[in-house]
Amino acid sequence: MGKLKIITTPLEGLYVVETEPFMDHRGIWARIFCENELREILQNRHIVNINLSKTSEQGTVRGMHYQLPPMAEMKLIRCTGGRIFDVAVDLRKNSPTYLHWHGEELSGESMKMFVIPEGFAHGFQALTDNIEMIYLHTEFYSQELERGVRYNDPAIGIQWPLKPTNLSERDQKHPMISNEDAEITITGNKNDTIHK
């Protein structure tokens, strides 16, 4: 009852997890996280932080965010209300899919979870008004080590379903990948060094 099914994506280390809910005349019951069932993905990681995010306007884009080592983190993302287009970008310079992106539509109805490992930037677009998301993190937040890349960087070429709107000032000013001063991680390991 309520099993979690792990599905691979074209980008190594990036997963979608499907939830099999139990349904009867009363409604549904579903598991949203189980360390045992996700051991293959988590390995020796543990969830240390759980956050709630709400976005009111359709079209809003938040991202693309990541943290530098040694605070690089895996994020497990669920949309619990409304619909979003959730995106991960591979920033691991040694990866054959460096600068490739993968997007998944998440919603409260689909009950999918997007698992984004260290070395990826993450962002999303609200496809409906009043979306709600749950983030599970394997590392604590570090303002000093938080970074981002531009949501519309042509070197990445994310195809947002709607015209991006309502971006924060910070997200509009993230560096372009082509900017030689941009700091990005070179692999997914939280202990890796940073190249500039």
Image (cartoon, rainbow, N blue to C red):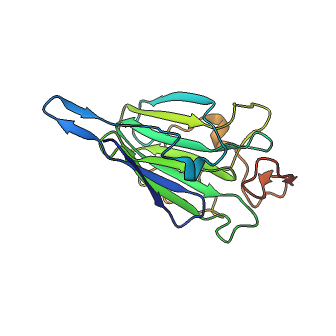
Check the image and name the residue furthest to the bottom: 96
Of the pair 15 and 109, the residue shown nearer to us: 15
**Would you say 177 lies left or right of 29 here?**
right
Does residue 142 appear left or right of residue 77 in this picture? right
Image quadrant where one finds the C terminus:
bottom right
Instruction: Give the residue at the far left of this rendering.
Output: 25
Whole-percent x, y for residue 110 in the image:
32, 46
Q: Does residue 174 lie above or below 16 as drawn?
A: above
- In the picture provided, is 170 more to the left or to the right than 60? right
Residue at 20% of width from left, 31% of height from top? 27
**Is any part of residue 21 visible from this angle?**
yes
Rendered position, 157 above or below 42: below
Give the image location of residue 72, x and y in percent. Answer: 73, 43
The front one of 92 and 100 is: 92
134 sits left or right of 98 in the view: left
Q: Residue at x 85, y 53 (%)?
A: 181
Q: Residue at x 55, y 35 (%)?
A: 136
Frontmost residue, 129 versus 36: 36
Q: How many circles with numbers are drawn on the protein?
A: 0
Residue 70, image quadrant: top right
Q: Name the quarter where the N terminus is drawn.
A: top left
**Percent of width and height locating residue 14:** 56, 57
* Residue at 39% over, 39% down: 58
Whether residue 61 is visible to the viewer of this picture, yes or no, is no
